Each structure stands twice: as structure tokens, then as C-alpha cells.
Amino acid sequence: MNWKNLGAVLRHWLLPKICVHCKEDLPCGGKGLLELLCPFCAVALSPAQVPFCRRCAAPLLAPVIYCDGCSPKMPQACALIRSTFFYRGPASSIVHAFKYRGRRGAAKIAGAHMAQALGRFPELGLFDGLVPMPLHPGREMERGYNQARILAEEISVATGVPILDLLTRGRATQPQLRLSRKQRREN
């Protein structure tokens, strides 16, 4: 065993990493998703695959085109949404880890998986740039990073598509975590 491996084992023993979903201890030396999830939870990730809603990519059980929340008769702020994994179970825990628990590395891993998944969604077409949504300076200072920027950086590295800083956040808004759909729209 070399000194680098010994250091990693000692770090793991003193400060063990835990699965962001089930909170079980992670094995030493995991890479990629196994830096965040135990093997059981990593296998439980559900890649977004058809059938899913044409607009938001929510999983569908019935032979319909849109989910209940995406009726084509209702105006939507965003016409097309795709995700690497269905947002449930371990996938939602990964997002919460980088947004609310300071796990910056989780955003890097998620961004790399987002870049890998782009080929599964030809309907997204080609794009000229990545535009991360900025955080209000106060929130970014509190969190220490902008998770959308980290995701965009990882996708940019994998695809060669540049990051374009075209947006600014003019006012602090309430965190949307515990808001209803109506409250989110108003926020």
C-alpha cells in the first residue's frame, strides 16, 4: 500500500463518507456516482426513458402524450425539459446534497452524467451555449458556490459548448423548496 492510499484509508476511517440517500457508510475509494451513493442506491437510479411526458419528461404509465400537469392547453414557462434520471429516490438526494448540504462534488458528478445523457435526447438538438441561472449574491455567498454554474462547467468540459453569462439576478427570491406550484410561479 502506498502513502496516497494509506492517506485515503485514514481519511475514510476518521471522516467516513455516507450515501447521500440511505446514509450508509460508503466503501473507501468509490469513483463517480459511488462517491455519493452506496452500490444499492446507485443501482436504484432510474434513467429517464420513454414513455415520459413530451414536455417535462415525467414518467408516464398510461398511453398519453402529456402528464396531468403539462396539458398543452395550459401555457408553460418552459417548452421542453429533459433529465438524466427521474427525479425520485437517489436522484433527488443527489440534487439536495449539492443544493442544500454543501456537497459541491455532487454537482460535478451530476453535471458529468447530464453531459453523457445528452445523446439520449435528440429532441434537444444542438445548442450554442450553456447559460447557468445565477444565484442572488447573498445566497451564493451563503452557499459558497452556484450549483447551476458547476453543472454547466461539467457539461461544457464534456461537450466543448461554451458557458455564456447572459443573466443576472436582480432580487433575492424565496427558496422554492417548500412552496406550492402557485407560490413558485408568484415567486
Image (spheres, rainbow, N blue to C red):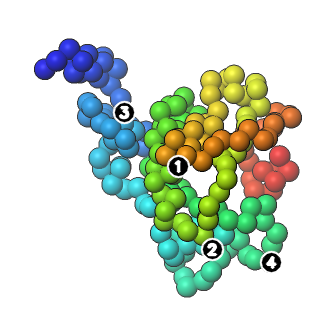
Q: In which quarter of the image is residue 101?
A: top right
Residue type at the position of mark 3: Ile
**Does residue 93 appear left or right of residue 34 in this picture?**
right
Q: Name the residue that disc number 4 marks.
A: 73
Residue type at the position of mark 1: Thr
Task: Sort mark 4 into few (<14), some (14-19) or many (20+) by Cα contacts within 10 Å.
Answer: few
- Badge 4 marks a residue whose secondary structure is loop
Q: Earlier in the sequence, mark 2 or mark 4?
A: 2
Q: Residue 54 carries which label?
A: 2
**Does residue 53 appear left or right of residue 86 in this picture?**
right
Give the number of the mark in front: 3 or 1: 1
Q: Name the residue that disc number 1 marks.
A: 159
Asked whether 175 or 104 is in front, the reply is: 104
- Badge 3 marks a residue whose secondary structure is loop
Spatial separation of the CA atoms under disc 2 and disc 3: 36 Å
- Badge 2 marks a residue whose secondary structure is loop
- Badge 1 marks a residue whose secondary structure is helix
Asked whether 141 or 186 is in front, the reply is: 141
Q: Residue 22 carries which label?
A: none
Q: In which quarter of the image is the N terminus?
A: top left
Q: Name the residue that disc number 3 marks.
A: 18
Name the residue at 73% across, 76% down.
71
Q: Is residue 94 visible?
A: no
Spatial separation of the CA atoms under disc 1 and disc 2: 25 Å
Name the residue at 36% across, 33% down.
18
Task: Sort mark 3 into few (<14), some (14-19) or many (20+) by Cα contacts within 10 Å.
Answer: some
Spatial separation of the CA atoms under disc 2 and disc 4: 14 Å
Residue type at the position of mark 4: Lys
Spatial separation of the CA atoms under disc 3 and disc 1: 31 Å
Give the number of the mark in front: 1 or 2: 1
* Contact? badges 1 and 4 (CB < 8 Å): no
